[in-house]
Image (cartoon, rainbow, N blue to C red):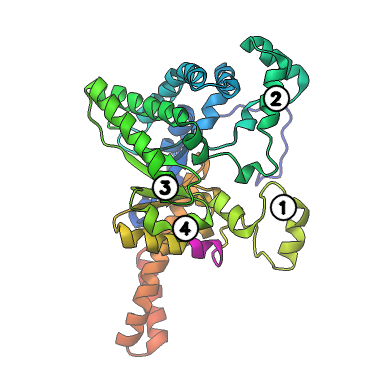
Amino acid sequence: GGTGEVYVGRQPTVEPELGGEFGELMTWVDEFRTMGVRANADIPRDAKVARAFGAEGIGLCRTEHMFFEGDRIKAMREMIVADTTEGRRAALAKIEPLQQSDFEGLFREMDGFPVIIRTLDPPLHEFVPHGNNEIRVLAENLGVSFRKVKNRIEALHEANPMLGFRGCRLGIIYPEITEMQARAIFKAAAKVKKEGVNVIPEVMIPLVSGITELQLQADLVHKVAKEVIKESGVDFEYFVGTMIELPRAALMADQIAQTAQFFSFGTNDLTQTALGISRDDMGSFLMPYTENEIFKKNPFATLDQTGVGQLIKIAIEKGRSTKPDIKLGICGEHGGDPDSVKFCHRVGLSYVSCSPFRVPVARLAAAQAAIEEKRAAAAPAAGKNVRGGASASAAQTKTATNNNKRTTT
C-alpha cells in the first residue's frame, strides 16, 4: 500500500510471521504491559492464528457460529421445529459430538491458556430459512408439513429481536440447549486433559439482567460438570461467568458477582442498549452526528467512555465490592481499538479480547497505557524533588527516554 503500485492478477503470498523488527517490538511491548490480551475465536484455525499473534487465551468463542458448519444447520433447524422436549433433545444429540470436536480443537490450540465459551446467544429466527421454497425443502427433509414449519418460523418473528428471545432467555426456556453445550464443553475438556493438554474452560452466560437468570443457568452448568467429571473419571478446573451487556446488569453487578466467577463486558450490545442505537441501522445518521460532534467517534468503533464507560466503572466497582478477585475483561470489538484498550487499562480490567489480527494492536496499546500510567505517577514526584520544578522534571523525562528507547517506542 505504501508503494503506490497496482498489481494485475494473483500475486504469490506467504503467511505473515512476527519476526524481525516487528517481532522485537512485540517482545518490548510484553515487557511493559500489565493487562492480558485474548482473542475472539470460534474455530481452531482462528485460535491458531491468535496464538501466533500472541493471544493469551480466548476471550470469546461464539458457539452459534459452529452451527452453520456443514450439515449442522439441519440438526439445529430440526431442534427449532420440534415441539417437544424429547424432539429437541434428539436433534441436539446430533450436534453435541460436533461441538465437542470443535471445543477439543480450541483447547489444544490454547494449551495452558483459558478459553471462554459463550452459550447460545442469537435469536432462533437467524437459523431458519424464510423463503417459501427453502421452507418447503426444510419441511421435506424433516418429514413434516410445510404449514407446520411455516407456522413455527412465523412464530419466531420479533419486532426487535436484539431485545427479544435470545441469550440466557433461550437457555432458561429450553434448558436442554445449555445442557448440551455444557456437556460438549466438559467432555472435550476431559478428553484433551487425558492427552496431556492443560485445559481451562470458562463458560459464559450471555444477556443476563440480574442474578436469578445467571443462577438458573449456572446451576445447570455445574450439574453437567459434575456428571461429566464422574463419568470420565477426569477432574478439571472450570469457571462460570457472564457477559455484562445490559445497563441493568452493570447496575446489579454486586448481586451478579455472588454467582459469577468472571465478568466480560460485551461492549457491542452494552453500547446499543445504553445509547438506544442499533449498530446495524445507524448509518443514516452517523455522519451528521460525528460532524456535529454529538459523537466524537463512531461509538461502535471507539468506546463511549463518558457514557458506556461509566456503566463499566460502576459494574467493576460493584462487582469487586462483592468479589474482590473477580476476573474482568471485555470481548466486544472495542477490545482491538487503542483508545478503548487504554481506557480498559485505566479502569483496571484483567484483559481485553479482540479479533485475532488485532491482537498485536491491543498488545501495543496495553503497553502504551502502562507506560503512560507510570509516567503520570512519576511526574508529580519528580517535580517536587528536583530543583527547577517542571523544567527539571521534563529534562529528567527526556534523559530517561534517551536511556530507554523501548519506552519511547
Residue range highlighted in magenta = 305-311
Tell me if label 4 and label 2 are in contact, CB under 8 Å. Answer: no
Residue 164's mark?
none
Disc 1 crowd rating (10 Å Cα; few below 14, some 14-19, many 20+) is few
Q: Is residue 362 above or below residue 156?
A: below
Alpha carbon distance from label 1 to label 3: 33 Å
| Image x and y of residue 346, in percent | 42, 64
Q: Earlier in the sequence, mark 3 or mark 2?
A: 2
Q: Which residue is mark 3?
A: 212
Residue kind at label 3, given as amino acid type: Thr
Q: Is residue 125 above or below residue 262?
A: above
| Image x and y of residue 316, in percent | 40, 60
In this view, the mark in front (4 or 3): 3
Disc 4 crowd rating (10 Å Cα; few below 14, some 14-19, many 20+) is many
Tell me if label 3 and label 2 are in contact, CB under 8 Å. Answer: no
Q: Earlier in the sequence, mark 2 or mark 1?
A: 2
Tell me if label 1 and label 3 are in contact, CB under 8 Å. Answer: no
Q: Which residue is mark 4?
A: 250
Residue 282's mark?
1
Tag 1's secondary structure? loop
Q: Which residue is mark 2?
A: 151
Alpha carbon distance from label 4 to label 2: 37 Å
